Image (tube, rainbow, N blue to C red):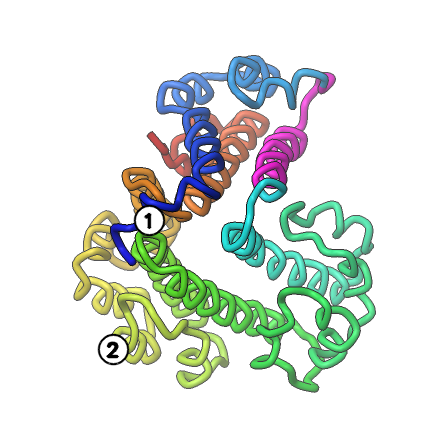
Amino acid sequence: MYGFEALTFNIHGGYLEAIVRGHRAGLLTAADYNNLCQCETLDDIKMHLSATEYGPYLQNEPSPLHTTTVVEKCTLKLVDEYKSMLCQATEPLSTFLEYITYGHMIDNVVLIVTGTLHERDVQELLEKCHPLGMFDSIATLAVAQNMRELYRLVLVDTPLAPYFSECITSEDLDDMNIEIMRNTLYKAYLEDFYRFCQKLGGATAEIMSDLLAFEADRRAVNITINSIGTELTRDDRRKLYSNFGLLYPYGHEELAVSEDIDQVRAVMEKYPPYQSIFSKLSYGESQMLDKAFYEEEVKRLCLAFEQQFHYAVFFAYMRLREQEIRNLMWISECVAQNQKSRVHDSVVFIF
């Protein structure tokens, strides 16, 4: 099919692809970030953002501003754009757009279940949930005592239901089990999304395979680093890795037996695309790893816009906008806490 998309793609997808490319032009540039990093107060940040697409969302907010307000309003803009695109999408693009939100659904489920375990107020937890991952019965998650109840009472009617087959156990929910549940769900979700994109074929399959493989590999590295020194066995760790990606299968075998960050680094340096990420880090250091992965992801997402007639631009745009919101949150926090010397530590420039 590859090469023939140009004949029929624009019948259903042309308008929305043009819209999403227009949205991409509104992403903040390096010059915007440099100006934001000079700001002294959150009101200065608001004033600078008033000249961008975030202006209408922040203009009626009273002073003094809070970081949460800035992030909330910027996320609201993303949600509005997403809903507007979803309303106008036809199959298979509408299903593709829905897949993009499943990751947020998983995060919301884990947030509610963990918060309930620590006896936090459900209403307070719901306010912290990502708006793209909301579903009707999310508030009732609080009643579940174990995985089986969680599935039977709440999740059976949500799009996450098929992903739960691997992690339904009668074990009580505790911090360790919840973290394993999150990673098992993410593994099932990424594999399902990967299969869906392969089925679509053409440029969508080609570009999304690369982006999802990168996501799967990043999760494998993070799972390995976070499980060093815990009671998670090698076999359990191996089960949490997705069954695709550049590291699959031989890299996974080596990661499963890694005991420290330097062994993880030795495994990753065998793969040229990841060599450059680890070359930025000094030995034994993992704090800057997230930023290095984000920078590599942003590069790949920007490349998705270089081709036409494919759906990966929608995935790329949503991810770039989410990265932009993370950047704004970090800058706002640094300004609010008077830590301007650290403002460049976690900002990932998009253009």
Q: Is residue 303 above or below residue 220?
A: above
Question: Magenta span has 72?
Answer: yes
Q: Position of residue 236 (x, y in %)?
A: 46, 82
Q: Indicate which disc residue 5 carries.
A: 1
Residue 298 vs 177, above or below: the answer is above
Determine if the magenta segment contains residue 30: no
Q: Is residue 342 visible?
A: no
Q: Quadrant of the N terminus?
A: bottom left
Give me the residue at 79% from left, 61% from top.
137
Instruction: Tell me where the magenta segment starts and ends, as one range.
Output: 61-85
Work out whether residue 333 or residue 77 is closer to the camera in this orientation and state it. 77
- Dominant secondary structure of the magenta stretch? helix
- Dot 1, crowdedness within 10 Å: few (<14), some or many (≥20)? some
Which disc number belongs to residue 334? none
Front: mark 1 or 2: 1
Depicted 79 relative to depicted 134: above or below: above
The residue singled out by tag 2 in the image is: 250
Residue 292 drawn at (x, y percent): 32, 47
Q: Is residue 313 visible?
A: yes
